[in-house]
Amino acid sequence: MAENAAREKATPDVATDSPGARLTSLAAAVGAVKLRGPAPVDKWHPAYCGEIDLRIAADGTWFYAGTPIARPAMVQLFAGIMRKDPERYVLVTPVECVGIAVEDVPFVAVAMEEKDGVLRFVTNLGDEVEAGDAHPMRFGVDPDGGVKPYVHIRGGLEARLTRTLAIELLDRAEERDGTLGIASGGSFFAIGPAEAQA
């Protein structure tokens, strides 16, 4: 009996190769740690286990095997264990590290407000940050030549502002020494030469 039990325990579970099983195992590993908020992924360094068919679209929608993940709690859970390594975006637990695909950046900033010279952003997953030294902004370029603003959320992960917020933000731009940029929290984030933006 004991020998049979040991053999069964040592036999790989076939279900681990089924669709969604890897996500389930990741969720279980995170649940075992009993986290509140984002995980300390910078302290977890398990072996890289390859990629899974998980993709974050440019609009912030999460897909697994081509299907949108319908459970917000699941998306929140995986967002909390995401990290940006030099080579790729990964989901990390104490025992596993898997690569995922991100079309642009993982988050989308969906709300913005200004108070006492500080811009505060809220992402599609509820993260709240204030633009400044700890959460710098940068500006990319759209294929059509427009400006794409980003704000750092945590651990190398960024949020792209929606087009509506981008327009509102750029209306706040000011010129300093020939450079157009955004001021927030005592920092000045350059967009580019003022003449080029005119």
Image: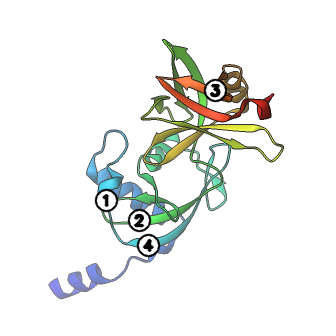
Mark 2 neighbour class, 10 Å CA radius: few under 14, some 14 to 19, many 20 or more: many
Discs 4/1, front: 1
- Report if the CB atoms under discs 2 and 1 are less than 8 Å apart: yes
Please give the name of the residue rendered at 80% of the width and 48% of the height, measured from the top-left corner.
143
* Residue 92: quadrant of the picture: bottom left
| Amino acid beneath label 3 | Asp
Q: Which mark is first along the chain, 1 or 4?
A: 1
Separation (CA) of disc 4 from disc 2:
6 Å
Q: Which mark is first along the chain, 1 or 2?
A: 1
Q: Is residue 145 left or right of residue 87?
A: right
- Above or below — where is 138 with respect to 94? above
Q: Is residue 188 left or right of residue 162?
A: left
- Report if the CB atoms under discs 4 and 2 are less than 8 Å apart: yes
Q: Using the image as rendered, state which of residue 172 and residue 54 is in the foreground.
A: 172
- Above or below — where is 174 with respect to 193? above
* Residue 83: quadrant of the picture: bottom left
| Amino acid beneath label 2 | Cys
| Amino acid beneath label 4 | Cys
How far across and how far down the image is residue 12, in percent? 37, 80
Pointer 2: what residue? 97
Please give the name of the residue rendered at 35% of the width and 56% of the height, measured from the top-left corner.
28
- Report if the CB atoms under discs 3 and 4 are less than 8 Å apart: no
Pointer 1: what residue? 44
Q: Which mark is first along the chain, 1 or 3?
A: 1
Pointer 4: what residue? 49
Pointer 3: what residue? 177
Q: Using the image as rendered, state which of residue 11 and residue 102 is in the foreground.
A: 102
